[in-house]
Image (tube, grey):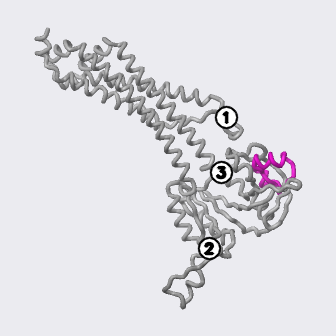
Amino acid sequence: MNYLLIADIAKSLLLARWRQSLVAAIGVTFSITMFIALLGFMNGLNDLLDGLILNRTPHVRLFNEIKPSLEQPVNLSDEFKGGYNFIRSVKSSGSRPEIYNSAAIMQAISADPRVRGFAPKITSPVLYNAGTIDITGTVSGIDVVAESDLFFFKDYVTAGEPLDLKNVGNSIVLGKGVADKLLAEIGDVVQVTTSKGGRLPLKVVGFFQSGIQELDKVQSYASISTAQKLLGKPNNYITDIQVKLTDLQMAPAVAREYAQRFGADAEDIQTANSQFETGSFVRTLISYVVGITLLIVAGFGIYNILNMMIYEKMDTIAILKATGFSGGDVRKIFLGIALSIGLLGGLLGLVLGFSLSLLIDQIPFNTAALPTVKTYPVNYNPYFYVIGIVFALLTTYLAGYFPARKASKIDPVIIIRGK
């Protein structure tokens, strides 16, 4: 059968009821437009919300957790072996919070091809002294360059220059909440006291705002050398090693390997932030469900239009079959009509969806909690557009299949006899 002839007949039938065909195409266009815009916006929102935590979270964190020893002395005694030993009020072991042999561990990590980079860190609880009032907080000693490259530290510094932590001795970047409590400005000197009683005056060189208010009320940053001086510790004192991998999915396996290899505690990002992955999945799922529902609704519109077209074109179908067109040819004609509506509406929907996404991306979004965000977030992943056009064609194909099958089974003799 000549496919050009089938295509020409499908075109004629499509244009014969062009108003109804246009309505069906508009339905597909609207569905694809909203599908693309909704999916892009929701995924952009996911990236923003997850980035508040995940961008600041290492894929693998090495640390030395203070905890009771699993092997108590009584269990090692020959006299009590083979029995059940009940020990009350077990205390934490005398281990120190720093990572043992941290320099050698960092050297080994840097040689691992799975590692994209690492950043050492020192975490210490402190008191910010404001006159007679002491404000509880935390100071993190960081390598500013590594922290900016791997964990976007500089993106969250809203005032001042991040590198001043490295270049200015005894300096600190205060969390915005801490700065507001202390009424501190850049250039001021704040007194910081450790839990051991050590006190050090630090010059404020910047403000940090993560977007998580409770964190910004307590968290501040200093250089590693300043943190070591604050705590009165030697140059090899490190409490955390933060590792970024080339592949996030390797984090659980690498964490287990590092814990066994280096004799330190290790936590992977999936374990530390499982709640954020769940939230992202639910929001993305809602976006897909809404978009697919819109496509299904558009598919019913195409189904109804093709059904009406078949009833109105009974004579045409009978003549086609009487002149040698088979049932398969008739089915191809009506499937061609459905797919033409889906393709036209889908392509136009992709263009309008992209345009709507650009419009959303330009709408101002100003909030004190997220100073680095200026407009509503949108994700332009090409994968969304591929999904959109595939679903448009699939939905319109299914919508046209059943009317096309019905048309292919029409007996021309019955139709002509009825006339």
Q: Earlier in the sequence, mark 1 or mark 3?
A: 3
Which residue in the structure is indicated by mark 3? Answer: 149
Q: Earlier in the sequence, mark 1 or mark 2?
A: 2
- Using the image, determine if residue 250 lies above or below residue 295: below
Say whether residue 189 is magenta.
yes
Between disc 1 and disc 2, the foreground one is: 2
Residue at the limit of the structure toward the right, as seen here: 131
Q: Amino acid at mark 3?
A: Asp
Residue at 56% from the left image edge and 56% from the top image edge:
269
Between disc 1 and disc 3, the foreground one is: 1
Give the residues in magenta.
162-190
Residue at 54% from the left image edge and 88% from the top image edge:
80
Q: Earlier in the sequence, mark 2 or mark 3?
A: 2
Residue 335 location in percent, x, y? Answer: 28, 25
Say whether residue 361 is magenta.
no
For the residues labelled 1 and 3, the Cα–Cα distance comes to: 22 Å
For the residues labelled 2 and 3, the Cα–Cα distance comes to: 36 Å
Q: Label 1's element?
A: loop
Which residue in the structure is indicated by mark 2? Answer: 68
For the residues labelled 1 and 2, the Cα–Cα distance comes to: 48 Å
